[in-house]
Amino acid sequence: SAGVTVDVSAASQPISVTGGTGNDTFTGGSAYDHFDGGAGTDTAVFHGVKGDYKIGAANGTISVQDTNSSDGNDYTDYLTNVETLRFSDGSLSVSAGQSATNISGLSFTGATGSGVTMAYTPSSTLTVETSIKFSAITGERQFVLFGTSSGAWNSSTFAQTVGNHSTDIWVDPTTHHFVAYLWDAAAGAGVSVEGTTAAQAGQWYNLALSAQNGGALRLYVNGVEEGTAGSVQTMSSGDMFVIAANANAAGGGVTNAGLNGEVAGVAIWDSLRSGSQIQSDSQAIQAGSLSGGNLQGYWNFSSASGGTITPTTGSVAMVNNSTPFTEALTAAIGSSLTGTGTADIIDVGTGFGTVDAGGGNDTIKLSGSDLATMTTIIGGAGTDTAIVANAGTIDDTAAGKFTGVETLTVTGGAATSVTFGALGRYNGVNTIDASAVTGNLTVETSANFNGVTLVAGSGYNSMNAGAGVDAVRVLSSESETTLSGFSGQFSASFTGAYAGATLITNNVDELYFSDGKTLGLSNTANVLTVSGGSGNDVVHVSWGVDVIDAGSGGNDTLIASGGAATFNLHSGLTSADTITGGIYGDRLVL
């Protein structure tokens, strides 16, 4: 609907404006302004480019801080009920998220006999939502919720008797991604959508499944659609939903379990909810209050009493083997910042649960402390970079929050570590840029399936790599580097500008230098080999390196200043090559 436009850009004093029911637009001045958009879809306008503003969220309010005052200072504006931030180079979509400080509900064990049942028969259109947190992520397929029929459910043992289930959300036991599933009765086959977010213990998630006969199955995580929608002819029709219990689901060679964790509530709609509606729903579910048209059932789990939950809408739910909880809401759930289809630079402050950069070659900037409270960072299409300032420890859980990000840049002078394990190895990162790290750096990617390149810093650097072709790029030139070996690992020391740097590698295949040279590193049956390329190489090794391979050509300088080494010269020894051995019986192979 029509709204009003308020432009106070000429003002130098703080301004407070409250919008109405329409789609309002507000442009602030050079002061700390406050804008409440009210109802409608509202926009706040800023004079600079996106990358010159740090955007945060707290208690339902968006803060936008101008970090580049050289072109005029917008100071910091505080926004509520605003959906769009418009900059000179494009717009970002925002949701302020949860303003409540506590969340309540029921905790479940994941064992047989634990869960909640809700009677409901889906029509041709369905959206089911829940807000959950895992206490543990295991190697089992953990069912968050599933639909079934009362004839396949034993209400005494609170267990499913036969494998009749559809309209499910579970966690994949290998990738830990969320999966939406339904049985298509017309096609006689299952339809599934696997998301990109890796579930983590201790994080709150708002999960939603939507489906329509003759339409599509979709999965939403924190209001963001994930995976590729699946085509649906006719949904299998059950008459009840079960949450936090184990479905009787065979196949796939995996073990099944119910949700081991906490649930705030469940909502069922007979309409297709959009991503923005689901984000809004998540806040209401966690606050314990939800209403709206087409809402067929809402069960607030904090209202459980005597083994039942009396809903505001829908039939009474049955509860078994659960424990009430109330806790501080420390994660930023429901708050999101979404980019466009073009190249965005997004400077993320505190308080956002989800950042989705959208298409384009994007840069997402955040701090290590803010990363700890976030749930998902999505690079999207394009070649994307996440820059984590003062990174500190990025463990596997934190690394698993990234998806679709190709370069992870870390900075800071203190000790820094990055680990890609069972969660992080799926994040899509192929380059870890730590060139600005001056303190000790430890990188652990041995669980990775694909190669990773580390850009090392100027301090102590260590990398333990995994499968694929892994590499380290150092700040020094090839001629300034001396390689040694010990216990199957390579180490490098340097002269020149980066004489204080050190590198230790294990399972790293290639070493790149600032002058464009490349050396190969290999360990075959505890024989350590350094190999040159086709150009003019300067290869200097000390103790522990067994073989120096000159490569396929060039005028090479090969130096072994430590223990006995074997020099391999495939193109023969010419007057342009220089070979310098030590005192321990080196061999020359032409």
Image (spheres, grey):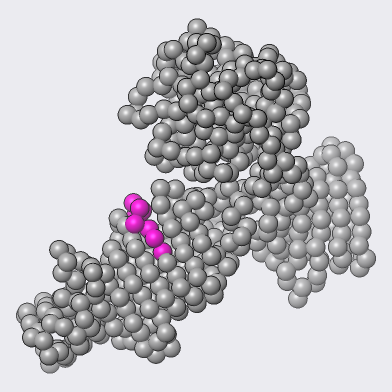
Q: Quadrant of the C terminus?
A: bottom left
Main SS, magenta region, reads loop
Q: Is residue 4 above or below residue 565?
A: above
How many numbered markers are drawn? 0
Can residue 39 be seen in this snapshot?
A: yes
Tell me where residue 553 sits by quadrant.
bottom left
Foreground of the two, 571 or 159: 159
The residue at 68%/17% (across/down) is 306
Q: Which residues are magenta?
A: 443-450
From the viewer's perspective, is 201 left or right of 569? right
Quadrant occupied by the N terminus: top right
Residue 583 shown left or right of residue 383 in the figure: left
- Does 373 lie within the magenta span? no
Q: Residue at (34%, 82%) from the top-left corner?
A: 493
Residue 515 vertical position relative to residue 245 in the rendered view, above or below = below
What residue do we see at 41% from left, 27% from top?
256
Residue 457: give x, y in percent of width and height: 45, 75
